[in-house]
Every structure is written in C-alpha cells, then in structure tokens.
Amino acid sequence: MTSMNTSTGQPQGSSHVGEQLRASIDAAFPRIVEQLSSLVAIQGIAWEAFDAHELDRSADAVAELIRGVGIDDVRILRVDNDGAPGGPAVVARRAAAEGRPTVLLYAHHDVQPPGDPALWETEPFVATERNGRLYGRGAADDKAGIMAHVGAFGALTEVLGDSFGVGVTLFIEGEEEAGSPTFRSFLETYRDDLAADVIVVADSSNWKVGVPALTTSLRGLVDGTIEVQVLDHAVHSGMFGGPVLDAPTLLARLIATLHDDAGDVAVAGLEGGDHASVDYAEQDYRADASVLDGVELAGTGSIASRLWHKPALSIIGMDIPSVALSSNTLLPRARAKFSLRLAPGQDPQAAMEAVRRHVESHAPFGAKVTFTPGETGSPFRTDTSEPASRLALEALEEAWGVKPVEAGMGGSIPFIADLTELFPSAQILITGVEDPDSRAHSANESLHLDEFRKAVLAEAILLARINDGGLTAG
C-alpha cells in the first residue's frame, strides 16, 4: 500500500498515477466516444408506449461493454412490478482483494423519449459531434455516466494491473426515466450483490464548463392533486354567471395563496434556509434557466439557497377545457397537479400534510376542495467530512485543475433515500457529466466532450486513491 505524505495527507505518487491515468484515458478517448455513440443509437425507453425490445438491446450492449474491460461476472437482472417484469438492469461484479473495500458504480441506460422531432437540430438517436459537444438523446443523461464508469475502470486496470484490488460493482439501471418503479424491490432482492463501502451515483451535473462539482444535497419531492368544485353540474354562464364563480377561477385564487407577494412558498410547516456557501450570480441563473428579459425572479435570499435549501412549489398540470374546446359555461370543477421540492432535512410526509392543511383552510368562497396526495421522495445531504467525499473533491480538483464546487441540486433523485436506508454504512457520492447547457430531457441534449474526458479521469483518480487506502487514512 502506498505510504502517506504527512505534509499533504495524500498518497505519495498519486500525481504520478494521475498522469498515467490521464495518458491512458486520452489514448482511449476516441474509442470511449465511439462506444457512447453506439449506445446513443439504441432507443431504450422504459415507457409502455415504446418498444421494449430496444430496452433489452440497450442492456445487452452495456453488458458487452463491461465485459470488454475485463469483468466477467455480468448479469442482466429484473424484478417484477405487479406481475409485470421490470426494466432490465445490468449488474457486474469484480470481487475485492482481501481487506480492500468495494465501490458500487451506478448509472442508468434508459433514456427519455425524444419529444417533438421538429425541435431537434440533429437526429436524436444519431450521436452528432458539433463544436466540441456530442448531441443525441442520452448522450449526457445518462449513457455518459455508464461510459465514465467503463472508461475509468479500463484505465485503472491498464495502469495499475493486479495492484488494483478495490472491489467494483456496476449497477446500470434500466427504468430510471420511468420513475424507477422496481428500484426498491431490486435492491432488496439483490442486496448482497450490491453491498458496498462507497456508492458513486453518476447522474448529476457539474457547476459549469471548466468547473466541476460534487453534488452535496438534493431537494426532496412530494406531489399531488387539488380539485375545486362549486356546482353539481355545468350551467350557462349568461343565465347563472355573477353570483357564483366558476371552478377554474376559484382554483386560480387557491393556487395564488401558495406563494406570498415576494414569491416565497407560503405553506406553513415547510422548512428552508438561506445558507448556501456558493454564489450563483443572477445573470448566470437567468441565462441557464432561459428567463425572459423583464421577468422578475421570485423569492428571497441568495439564488443558490432558493434553488437548494428552500422549498419550491409549481403547478405542473391542470384539468380544464382547452381554449379550442371552451364554451360559455360555468365549469363545476377544476383540478391541478402540484410538484413541491423540499429543502434538505424536511420530512416528506410532514410536507404533504402541510400542503393538505393549507389548501383545505384556504378554500375560496367556501368551495369544496379535495386534496389527493401523490408520490414522495426524501431529500439528501452529504457529510463532506467523510473520507470518500474528501477523496472525491481531491480527484475532481486534480482532473480539472481547479477547485470543485460543493453544490446542492434543486432537483430530486428519490432512489437515493432507498440507497441510504438499505446501505446505511455506505458513503454516497453524487457525481455527473452534465453542465448547464446539456439540456437533459429536452431537445438537443448534448455532452461537452472535454468535460466528459475529465469526468472519466476524476473517477479513475478517485478509485486509485481508494485503492491506496484513502478511506482509512487519517
């Protein structure tokens, strides 16, 4: 085992190994991009409306890529979901040498549907390189995550050979974009196969091009529907309009109570704070979020805190007639679906009840309000004092040559809560290959290739430092 440099606390020779890993990855990078492009060509979408055969093809292709870097124990596994088979997951294992830890590397091979083809500037399932970016559905989310794992492992075995004794398990899920419906049961079924000391989830984003990030917090999520009813049935707006307001109008009034005049969420019982340590400039946020000129930003506190450490409530759907189908009628009922992002530390069930209490107590004009709870997902916060987090931050800095950001993420990864619960002793790291212009889930999804190269290198350096005893070094 490599001795420690007492002045830096880092393994002696780690920079030399890093240089070797960099050279190996640089040499292999054209092949890695070619393999990624081949994955992009497979339309593996885990939604019932799409061809399940393509999802099987995707799993088979991932399995072959993993075998190609020297892991022989590769299986494609499923668990049932209400009697129907779940999405195909690839599980590959290389056992740890005696006394060495095991690292689980997670990504997913399924992708979002392409959406409206007219919005794409290239064919969505033909990987196309333009101006240093690779365009295509899944190029960033999350087939690049798969190739980061495969590329890093290949470089490590080439550079370190038999001295690389860390156990490595790859878990490449096949239904993440469909909400991971069998994720929990899959973990419970194959718990022993997936047990690890460190879990690396490669499904997040870096701060910006040129600056890496370790995702240290995630907001949780609850959703549900709110229905307002005022009449037993629809009536003529001319004959009866005036003394009673229609359901869409009253629903709009109820929705308006969910935020105060500053734009902060006004639901009592929700947690939040203004303690982000990173400055997210307003002009950068406006550009990244494509905010129109003249639109004022909502809420108080720093931009980063509003994104990472405060609740955010959106109305993501409404059931009312479309303009094209509208008539002069007082509508008896209207329904809206809300999506509420939760600050780290917030209990999802308590948040759901807080929304219920709010809408039921703010029924406008005595309207009948029906609240129907939906899905929940717990927030997450990393303890950056843990050895794995320290090693990850060091690896990111070595790969990029700049200090990484410890960034929160406004979105949610609900299955992280399952990993935390079922593997309580594992240190969880959330990394990624995306940047603010990757446009995951949207048309013209793309991957910045130089950032991708650095992400592969950072993961290889992280695993090399774990191999050098970094998890136990003081």
Image (cartoon, rainbow, N blue to C red):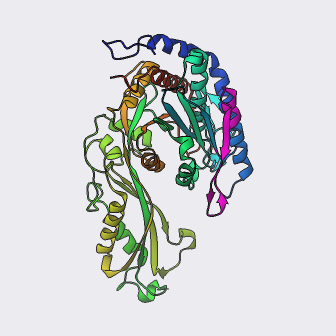
Q: Is 412 drawn above or below residue 254 in the view shown?
A: above
Which residue is at a point 54% across and 41% down the rendered structure image? 194
Pick whichever, 391 or 96, lies toward us. Answer: 96
Q: Quadrant of residue 424?
A: top left
For residue 238, what is the image quadrant?
Answer: bottom left
**Could you tell me which quadrant the C terminus lies in?**
top left
Q: Residue furthest front?
A: 98
Residue at image location 57% in from the left, 69% down from the top: 324
In magenta, the rendered stretch is: 63-89
* Residue 431 on image: x %, y %: 46, 34
Where's residue 251, x and y in %? 39, 72
Residue 430 in view:
yes
Residue 78, magenta (yes or no): yes
Residue 373 at what x, y percent from top left? 43, 67
For this view, does 392 lie left or right of residue 83? left
From this view, report whether residue 152 is shown above or below residue 312: above
**Percent coordinates x, y for residue 445 in the rendering:** 58, 39
Residue 26 in view of the camera? no
Q: Nearer the viewer, residue 22 or 461?
A: 461
Instruction: Say if 55 sits above or below 267 in the image.
Output: above
Q: Is residue 380 magenta?
A: no
